Amino acid sequence: MELIDHLRTRRSSLSLTLEEPGPTGDQLEGMLTIASRVPDHGKLSPWRFELWTPEARKAMHADIVALIDDEAEDAAKKRSGADKLLHAPCLIAVISQAQIHEKIPEWEQILSAGAACMNLLHAANAYGFEAQWLTAWYVYEKRAGSILQLGADERIAGLVHIGSSSAGKSERPRPTLESIFSTRKA
């Protein structure tokens, strides 16, 4: 019943509220083991996990901020997005590495990476931590590919921020079941 309650009420904590302590090495290993237990047709492991240390994130942040055109209308929003790299004590990049396969469509491989992100959120919560799955403008920015050290066929599926938080979580509007569910009849 605890799992059902968790799934029914799950809510991310904002990355800005995440602070120490973050997970230990053993806890993180457990979380990533859980995160990898997702549907993966063909056993391709079309994703990988990368821990971005605080030092690595500071270096990436400086390079990403340098990409921002300070005269652009969205410069402040882009800076805010880049600044989120610096907040949480632990940040795991879930990197999609979908490949051409004769039987497994790329779309299924990408969905598997998304499932790994979601499992990582659940695993963080199960270990007593708070987490948030984010992306930002720079994960879609071609010029940032070398900063993020992505391979030619790799994309960021999610940046999962993990830490502790005492900040309250407010509920957001959710769709009614009637608006997202239907029954198809012959």
Image (tube, rainbow, N blue to C red):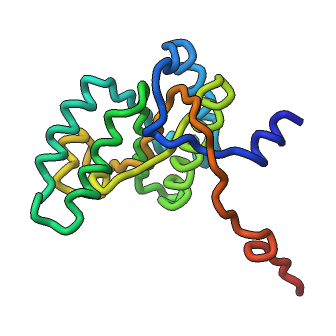
Q: Is residue 103 among the parts visible in the rendering? A: no
| Residue 22 placement (x, y as % from top left) | 49, 21
Q: Nearer the viewer, residue 29 or 167?
A: 167
Q: Quadrant of the N terminus?
A: top right
- Kindly identify the residue that appears in the image at 33 percent across and 24 percent down: 53
Q: Is residue 132 among the parts visible in the rendering? A: yes
| Residue 119 placement (x, y as % from top left) | 62, 39
Instruction: Examine the rendered structure and indicate whether residue 161 appears above or below residue 107.
Output: above
- Kindly identify the residue that appears in the image at 40 percent across and 46 percent down: 97
Relative to 15, is 174 on the left or the right? right
Relative to 69, is 39 on the left or the right? right
Q: How many marks?
A: 0
| Residue 32 placement (x, y as % from top left) | 55, 28
Q: Quadrant of the C terminus?
A: bottom right
- Kindly identify the residue that appears in the image at 46 percent across and 39 percent down: 15
| Residue 105 placement (x, y as % from top left) | 52, 61
- Kindly identify the residue that appears in the image at 46 percent across and 55 percent down: 101
Q: Nearer the viewer, residue 37 or 147?
A: 147
Outermost residue toward the bottom in this view = 186
Q: Nearer the viewer, residue 148 or 69?
A: 69
